[in-house]
Image: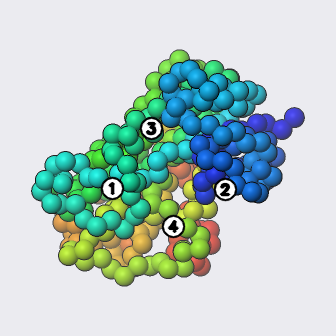
Amino acid sequence: MAPTTLVTGAVGRIGRGVGAALRKVGHRVVGVDVLPAPIGLVGDGCDHFVQCDLAAAGAGAGEAHDALREAMKGVSAVVHCAAWPGPSAVPPPAVVATGAARPPQIILEQIPPSVLLRDNVSATAAVCDAAVGAGATRFVFSSSAFAMGYSHAASGPQAYRPRYLPVDEAHGAMPHESYGLSKLVGEEVLECAARTATHTSFVSLRFTNIVKRDRFGELPWPAPTRDQPPTMMLWAYTHEDDVIEAHVASVLSPSAAAPGAHEPYLICAPDTRYAEPTLPLLASVLGIVNTPLTEPMAGNASPLSAAKARARLGFRPRSWQDGKGAHGGRVA
C-alpha cells in the first residue's frame, strides 16, 4: 500500500511542487489549503484535496479543526508549507521611527505583523498536533532562513549582523521581525512536540529567498551598492527545485531526524546572487567587517552553509555558475 503524505499549502507553488514530486516516487498525497483547488491540482499535485483554514484550526474546535483531523487519517508523513510566506510590509516600530527601512527586493505581506505571527504559529501548532495525533512518523516544516535573521534595515545598528561566517545551524537564531520570529516559534513548537512524540521525527528546512526556475537565468545580478543595499538574507538564494527536492528528501531520508528529535537544516546555493567576492561586498555595502570565519570563504561563496543538509539529506544545490541550473555546485 502506498504511503500517504499530507501537504499543506498545496495550492502554492512550493506545496504543489512537493506534492507532485512525492506522487512521482509512489506516495499518495493529500493536499490541504485555505484556497480552493485550482483546475488540475488533483491528479498533479495531490490525489485528494481538503480546503481548510489552518489558522482557524488552531482554535481547537470547529469546522476547520474537524476538517484537519479528518484529512490526517492514515498519513505517515506531513509536509507543512502553508504560511504567510514573507515579512510584513510594516517594519518594526523602532525601524520606522529611525527611517532605516529600505525599499525591499522581495515581496512583503500586506498584513499587520501581529496577524502574520498569530496565523503562522497557530497553523503550525494545529498541524503538528493533528499529525502527532494521527500517528505520523515524519513531520517536515517549511521554515525559513529568516528565522536566523533578516531586518527591514539593510545596514546600520538595526541590521542583521552574524556572529560568524558562514552562518550554520549552530549559529543561533536572531530574528528581527515577525515573519522570522513566526518561523522560529514554529520550530520551537516542533522541539516541544519531539520531547513527548517519541514516535515522530521532525525536520525544519530554513531555506533562503527562492529564485524561480523561469528566472534563474537572470543571475548574476549587478553588484549592489551602499546607496541601495538589498534587504535579503546576506544575498543567499535557493533554486526553486532545490527547495522542492529538499522537502522530498526530508520525507524520504531516514537520517534526516531520529524519532523524538527535531533537526533544522539551512538550505541554500553555494554562492550568492553576485559574481563579485562576498567578503569585500559585505564590507563595502553592508558594513559587515571583521566577522570571524569558521572556514575560508573564497570568491562569491554563500554567507550561509548547507553542509549539514549535504551530509544528512544528500542535498546538492544548484548554482547559477554551473550551467544555469545544473546540479553540482561547490561545497557550501
Q: Are marks 1 and 2 in contact (CB under 8 Å)?
A: no
Q: Residue furthest bottom?
A: 222
- Residue 242, image x and y in percent? 59, 60
Say above or below: 233 vs 275. above
N-terminal label among 1 and 4 = 1
- Which residue is identified by label 1? 89
N-terminal label among 3 and 2 = 2
Amino acid type, label 1 = Ala
- Which residue is identified by label 3? 119
Amino acid type, label 4 = Val
Question: How far is mark 3 from mark 4, CA to CA?
Answer: 25 Å
Q: Are marks 3 and 1 in contact (CB under 8 Å)?
A: no
Question: How far is mark 1 from mark 2, CA to CA?
Answer: 27 Å
Question: How far is mark 3 from mark 2, CA to CA?
Answer: 23 Å
Amino acid type, label 3 = Asp
Q: Relative to the observer, which residue lies in front, 23 or 322?
A: 23
Q: Secondary structure at mark 4?
A: strand
N-terminal label among 4 and 2 = 2
Q: Relative to the observer, which residue lies in front, 297 or 275?
A: 275
Question: How far is mark 3 from mark 1, CA to CA?
Answer: 16 Å
Say above or below: 90 vs 131. below
Q: Secondary structure at mark 2?
A: helix
Say above or below: 234 vs 173. below
Question: How far is mark 1 from mark 4, CA to CA?
Answer: 20 Å
N-terminal label among 3 and 4 = 3
Q: Are marks 3 and 4 in contact (CB under 8 Å)?
A: no
- Which residue is identified by label 2? 17
- Which residue is identified by label 4? 211
Q: Residues within 10 Å of mark 1 (few under 14, many from 20)?
A: some
